[in-house]
Image (cartoon, helix red, strand yellow):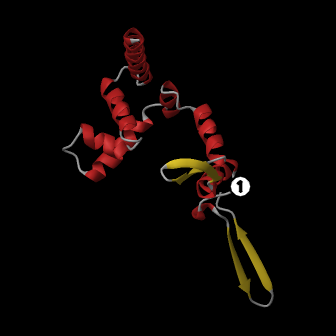
Amino acid sequence: MAKNKKTTKKRKVIRCQADKIAVLEECGGDAALAAFIAEWMKNGMNATKAYKKLHPEVTERSARVLGARQLTKVNISAILAIYDLGIDKYVEKLRDGLSAKSPVVWDGKVVDYYDDYRVRRQYHKALGELHGLEGRKSDTPSVSVNINNGIQVTFKDYS
């Protein structure tokens, strides 16, 4: 059994090295950019935190701008695909979220599951935004009504 664990660990190291090489290639051989992308992934895809971690001497505001600039230099979708975080994974997790259930715990034991509509609603909203059925408040069209000698209705579409 120890041999299996050792083999599994070796495979993970090889996979990790292959990922690093793929990221470096995607970054056009720029090691500093590849380091930033690795730090970006470690920091929950937060460019400001990643840049600040690599360059602690810069201000928060500068880190925000410079981190965003770093992200424009690479194809983020390709980077995410290297780590198996592409669109397929997104859709899979979205599908899982749409059927979310939470455990009912009694005396420290799970006795049943219930439909978790609070979690499901967040996934429904995300799916609705992807399809253009739901939007953020700033994305919704505004309607203004002017009453003069009659009723004039104006629709403004900001999409």
Q: State the image coordinates of residue 141 (x, y, percent, origin top left).
A: 67, 65
Label 1 secondary element? loop
Tell me what residue is drawn at x 79 percent, y 84 percent: 151
Question: What crowding class fits label 1: few (fewer than 14 Cα within 10 Å), some (14-19), or many (20 or more)?
Answer: few
- Which one is in front, 158 or 22? 22
- Which one is in front, 155 or 90? 90
Which residue is the site of mark 1?
Answer: 133
Residue 34 sits above or below residue 153 on the image: above
Q: Residue furthest right?
A: 150
Asked whether, in this view, residue 114 is left or right of residue 34, the answer is right
- Which one is in front, 15 or 49? 15
Q: State the image coordinates of residue 109 (x, y, percent, origin top left).
A: 52, 47
Q: State the image coordinates of residue 16 (x, y, percent, origin top left).
A: 39, 20
Residue 69 sits above or below residue 122 on the image: above
- The C terminus: image quadrant: bottom right
Tell me what residue is drawn at x 58 percent, y 33 percent: 89
Q: Amino acid at mark 1?
A: Leu
Tell me what residue is drawn at x 49 percent, y 24 percent: 82
Residue 119 picture quarter: bottom right
Residue 106 sits above or below residue 1 on the image: below
Q: Residue furthest left?
A: 57
Asked whether, in this view, residue 116 is left or right of residue 73, the answer is right
Tell me what residue is drawn at x 61 percent, y 60 percent: 139
